[in-house]
Amino acid sequence: MAFPIALVLYLLYLVVNGTGQQGSGPRFLFIVLFLLGIVLHELIHGAVFAAFAKDKWRAVRFGIHWPTLTPYCSCVEALSLPKYVLICAMPTIIFGLLPYFIGLAFGLSTLAYFGLLFIFAGGGDAYILWMIRKERQGLILDHPYLVGCVVFSPKLSDSCSTPVPAGQRSDVNLN
Ligand SMILES: [Zn+2]
């Protein structure tokens, strides 16, 4: 997690001090927007979690991992890969890719910078997506207190002492 955080801080420094222009008003606003964006980033994770979880918002947990100062959002219910992908990617799409490409298309550098920061801030999410990319049949459960998740794969039954015929592997239900 340290890598994306370092990149975000580096970019933030560039935004605040890098251009050499005077006046801190708009930059202060930018930082406030960025901090607000971090909170909204977690809230979007939570909203998509709540939309998919049977227990809705009651299944969603928010907190801060203090050693890395990383805010997190997790869900106590296991979800299928497509749902988990949406949960992971949504904040980066809304706060990262969307503003970045709008900024790119219309030459709005502040908006593009803003998007870029949130693309880097989503580095941890992107890393998780990369790690679970092949778990099409699995159920994904957030780790209760570490950044990351646990995958329940139906393939696990292969390691049982009694082999389970492929057609009868019903130990994991996808719904
Ligand atoms: Zn995230």
Image: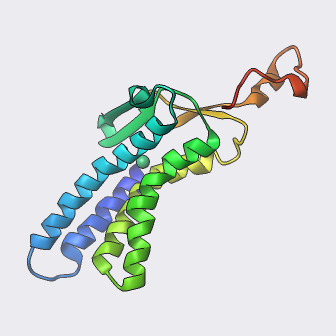
Where is residue 77? Give x, y as percent.
52, 27
Q: Is 142 on the left or on the right of 120, as rendered?
A: right
**Count of marks overlaid on the render:** 0
Q: Is 39 on the left or on the right of 161, as rendered?
A: left
Q: Is 94 on the left or on the right of 131, as rendered?
A: left
> Is 82 located above or below residue 173 in the figure?
below
Q: Quadrant of the C terminus?
A: top right
> Is 12 located above or below residue 153 in the figure?
below
Does any portion of residue 147 appear in the rendered image?
A: no
| Residue furthest bottom as drawn | 107
At x 57% / y 49%, what residue is drawn? 129
Nearest the camera: 155 or 81?
A: 81
What's the image's color scheme?
A: rainbow
At x 26% / y 72%, what residue is drawn? 14
Nearest the camera: 61 or 144?
A: 61
Where is residue 86? Give x, y as percent.
54, 49
Where is residue 170? Give x, y as percent.
78, 22
Where is residue 61? Give x, y as percent.
37, 30
Does any portion of residue 6 appear in the rendered image?
A: yes
| Residue furthest top as drawn | 162
Q: Quadrant of residue 107?
A: bottom left
> Is 47 located above or below residue 19 in the figure?
above
At x 38% / y 69%, what residue is drawn? 99
At x 91% / y 23%, what residue is drawn? 165
Q: Is 85 on the left or on the right of 55, as rendered?
A: right
